[in-house]
Image (cartoon, rainbow, N blue to C red):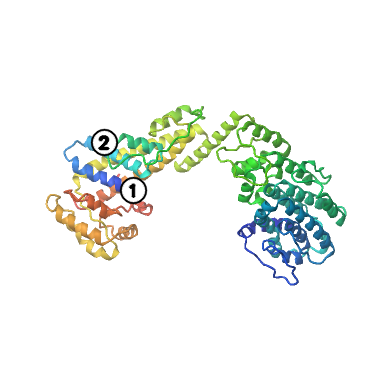
Amino acid sequence: MIMAFHFLGALSHIQKTTTHSTFVFRCHRIRCAAYTSMALSTGAHSAWSRALLRQKPRRGSLRKRTVILQRPRKRAVRLEEDCQDGADVLRRLVPGCDGMDSAELLDETADYIRCLEEQVSLMRSIVNVISLNFNPKS
Amino acid sequence: MSGMEKERFFVGNWQLADAGLPLGVNSSSGADQLPNSFVNLGWEHAMRQNSHAHIESALSSLVSSPSFNAPAGNDSVVIRELIGRLGSICNSGDASPSSRYHSPRASYYSTPLNSPPKLNISGADHQQQGMLVNPTADAQFELFAESAASKLGFAEAGKLSRVSSSQSLAAPSGKEVTVSDAVMEMPKFGRGRVSKWPPPEASSASGKLPAVVAENNGRKRKAAPKGKGKASPSSSLAMDPPPKEGNPDSKRRKQAEASAADRSPTVSKPKTEQNSSDDGQKPTENDNANPPEPPKDYIHVRARRGQATDGHSLAERVRREKISERMKLLQDLVPGCNKVTGKAVMLDEIINYIQSLQRQVEFLSMKLATLNPQLEFNMVCLLPKDMHQADVPLPQQVFPLDTATSPFSFAQQSLKIAETNRFNTHAAKNQLDSSIQLPPIVGLTDATNYLGNSDKDDLWYVIQTGFARSQEAPFSPQTLRAE
């Protein structure tokens, strides 16, 4: 729900401000808005959401309200030695997971996947609404 | 069989006992005055119906009720003696903690008391009286002894286990003699020195008991009471052999039960000692009777049989288990990964899925970008059902309008409507289901806030999402069609 609120607000904002922009630019803006709304809905307790919010200070106060101290890792153990390249790819895909060991990486991945799915379904429903709205009338 | 029934009822009655509800209190006639309400739980029934449970209840009431009035009976005299002595010992040794222990002890011990009322062990006759014939009863006594050992401090536990072992001894052999023997031997050993207790020559089950107690003596005791308090002892302890359930186990009961099959009594002891030596940083507790809080900063691990027990490999194993746990969670998230096994393949699937989701986001954002300028989405918030009629004409008027023509009037209208009517997703769902012709209109729960924020805008978007899961179903075929 929070995601919908943020995303729709961002969409409306983009709609207003980018009437004269290129299509590509608008695409990019919408995509950024999507990720930002994802991060906003998650809050600051996920590493990826924090990383996303750091990249895009746009809406509201994005200060990390609760500073989550990571307990000092004795060694950033990557226990998946046999699938190390898989873990690397994952680290590239999920934002903000660079210095993590595999266990936390998998946690972040799960959270990220959940949020992504929600965002995709939200965007899909918006597209449906708009297209349904649009098509019968035109 | 009766023992098994008993166990079942133990587990079932566990919560009742824990809640401390006085079940079936003193309903029997000729009931003696039982001092504690805890002990009263079905105790009288036990006394009357089944002397089998009689003994158990008697023994368990040892600790909980010092002054115990046994009903008349031959064996009851002996029991009274026993109880009196044990009760006196228990009470004299530990005045303050015992009062504390009364309730948890009683709650544990009352489980057998609860069972007899439900158990119709009509077959149990007074031939079995005094002694435990069933080996399961012995096991149960070991359970109690075990739990007693953890909760009470080891003196009483030793005594109790001694009693139970003597009881098991008594089963094949004579009756009152062994009981009195147990009674005699009780006062011999002082508090906490159970290890001096010569192991009884009886069954191996009772032979485990000194090991239990000795181990419990040597180990850190902190977590044991809490651990035992948490888990249902009959079920969990019945699974694992009693010696295994020590302090380190209580913290990771899952792993303990998972690797229960791997354990054996003889092997675990050196391993646990290595364990304790490895986690030397763990604060070692002295032999207090008080159960302190289990240390929360360390994750206690039990080495499995046949595996390395040094600190590194233990930590590695813990991490590997964590990782496999998370991989399982991810398997549930990612569709179609149930058949896939192995970390590498699983990771590839996850990566593919994330990439596809990200691609979908891009694609949908492209779609939105194309759709946005074409459609001036003046969307009205969908109102609750009672205003449905008023809504229907409104969107039809609105949508063909160009935004430049009458944004403000429309905005004000929608603002008014939004303010007067709080819509909810349920209403939206119903309306969406019913009105396919009406374009599904999206809005926000806090629409008024949103309106307040953007009243400066020329274009007014109040969008209500009915994007709850149930609405995805009507959307998905449309999605397929649209895409």
Look at 78% across and 58% down and name the residue there. Answer: B84
Q: Secondary structure at mark 1?
A: helix
Q: Given this view, does label 2 or label 1 mark the residue nearer the observer? A: 1
Query: Along the polypeptide, which appears first: circle 2 or circle 1?
Result: 1
Type of the residue with mark 1: Ile
Q: For the N terminus of chain B, which image quadrant?
A: bottom right
Numbered badge on residue B89: none
- Asked whether the residues under the numbered discs 2 and 1 touch, taking CB atoms below 8 Å apart as contact, a structural biologist would say no
- When asked about the image quadrant of residue B80, the answer is bottom right
From the top left corner, tell me how far across and down residue B464 is, in percent: 28, 53
Using the image, determine if residue B317 lies above or below residue B406: above
State the residue in front, A74 or B335: A74
B9 lies left or right of A112: right
Q: For the C terminus of chain B, which image quadrant?
A: top left
B12 lies left or right of B160: left
Output the chain of dot 1.
A
Look at 15% across and 52% down and name the residue there. Answer: B407
Type of the residue with mark 2: His
Mark 1 is surrounded, within 10 Å at the Cα level, by few (under 14), some (14 to 19) or many (20 or more) other residues, namely: some
Mark 2 is surrounded, within 10 Å at the Cα level, by few (under 14), some (14 to 19) or many (20 or more) other residues, namely: some
Output the chain of dot 2.
A
Q: Which residue is mark 2?
A: A28
